[in-house]
Amino acid sequence: MILLVRHLYWIAFFLPTWLIAQPPTPVATIAPAVQSVILDEYIREGLANNLGLRQESLDISRVTESINQARSLFYPRIAFNPTYSLAAGGRRLEFPVGDLLNPAYRTLNQLTGSDRFPTNIENVNQQLAPNNFHDTKVSFQYTLFNTDIQYNYLIQKQLLSAQEARKRVIENELRYSIATAYFQYLQSLDAVQILENARLVLNELARLNEKLVSNNVATREVVSSARYEISKVAQQLATAGKNRETARAYLNFLINRDLTAAVAVDSSLTKILPEAPEQLSELQQIALRGRQELVQLGGSLQAAQTSVRLNEANATIPNLYLGGNAGFQGFGYTFRNQAYAIAQIGLQWDLFRGYEKRSKIQQAKIQTDALQTRIQDVQRQIQLQVLQAYYDLDAANESLAATQSGIVNADATFRVIDSKYRNGQALLIEFLRYQNDRLTAQLQHSLARTDVLVKRAALDRAVAVK
């Protein structure tokens, strides 16, 4: 009957919390705008191997074990506790029972003419500390009602949900970091290629100028000017090469590979730009439904609300337990006529503790209010983050369009000047100026194209696109 009542109590206790703690129904999300098999593989590798995520997985495993420990308190506890005592000295119990009873018993024997009454009773002289004494028992303890155990179990489960959401937050950040690092690596390769092409153009210019000098068409300074321009591009190439190796090392660091490992190149990413994003209001709503920061705070809020219920239950509901011992107890390990059994049922109910429980309830409510305020603040921060990422992407697209127009005009101008210079109709300074303008336009266009990819990755991170 007691077990039936306890099970009904558990059902009444857990059902409302179980309904509240169920995960929300998945909502529709948008797909990432940049599709690349190679990049997706690097992201998967990073999610599997990143050391920061491994640490989060270990933290989740630790919290899971805390849940298992909390669950174990619902089961009965059985222990085998044998003890054996040896003692010497100490206080003794002395009582002259023989001196009191033996003379009386002799008189009774004389009066009755028999030996019915013993006359050799010894005085009591017993050592209080038990010597050669054993207590071999099996202890049993079973909690019938205990609000601490039940609510702490729920709190641990809710904290696990928050910990899992924290891991997904880090995964979202890692996706963005890997994508950004990959885009920057591609841009560094593009910059190297642009500078290599510029050096080829200048090398061709130097050879042309040497022919002009040898044919007495131009003076020697045109050769030195061309070689000076080649040295300037060589310096830029050295910087670009350093940037390429740094970008590759950082990408390998994020996915926990050897820092000098080769990186596969998806050239389509530098040619196909991401599609236009959805409406800003729609993106903000998707972010509010999908951002794991809110899920993490929601788990913490549930744990705080459960803490309020825990403290309120501690103030009004007593704890009830059942226990007992069974075994053998006596002097010497004979087990003969030494068996015993004890059954116990106990109740603990704190009637007054100096208003401590009332203060704990208020403290838990304050924590709940603080988390609710924090959730509202994070929601507004997420909306602002999406808005900033949305307009950053819009500005990056406009900048890319401007650089696209610039590179077309710079190429057209350079082709005209190149033709004129070869025909002796333009000065070297004009050739170098428009060649530098074209190089600058190409580098700016490469940076602007990469910036669009990075800004779209930032928008995907803000919206929590997987």
Image (cartoon, grey):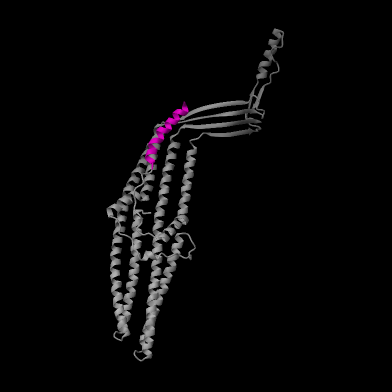
Instruction: Indicate the quadrant containing the C terminus: top left, top right, bottom left or bottom right.
Output: bottom left
Q: Residue at coordinates 30% horizontally, 75% vertically from top-left?
A: 410
Left or right: where 420 falls relative to 197: left
Quick one: which residue is furthest to the top in this view? Answer: 112
Q: Residue at coordinates 46% horizontally, 61% vertically from top-left?
A: 253
* Residue 360 visible, this angle: no
Q: Residue at coordinates 48% horizontally, 43% vertically from top-left?
A: 66
- Magenta span includes 204: no
Q: Nearer the viewer, residue 108 or 384?
A: 384
Question: Where residue 457 appears, x then y in whole percent?
Answer: 36, 59
Left or right: where 28 falls relative to 159: left
**Above or below: residue 432 compared with residue 455:** below
**Above or below: residue 97 compared with residue 78:** above
Left or right: where 267 falls relative to 100: left
Q: Nearer the viewer, residue 132 or 448?
A: 448
Quick one: which residue is furthest to the bottom in this view? Answer: 216
In magenta, the rendered stretch is 1-22
Question: Where residue 4 appears, x then y in whole percent?
Answer: 45, 28
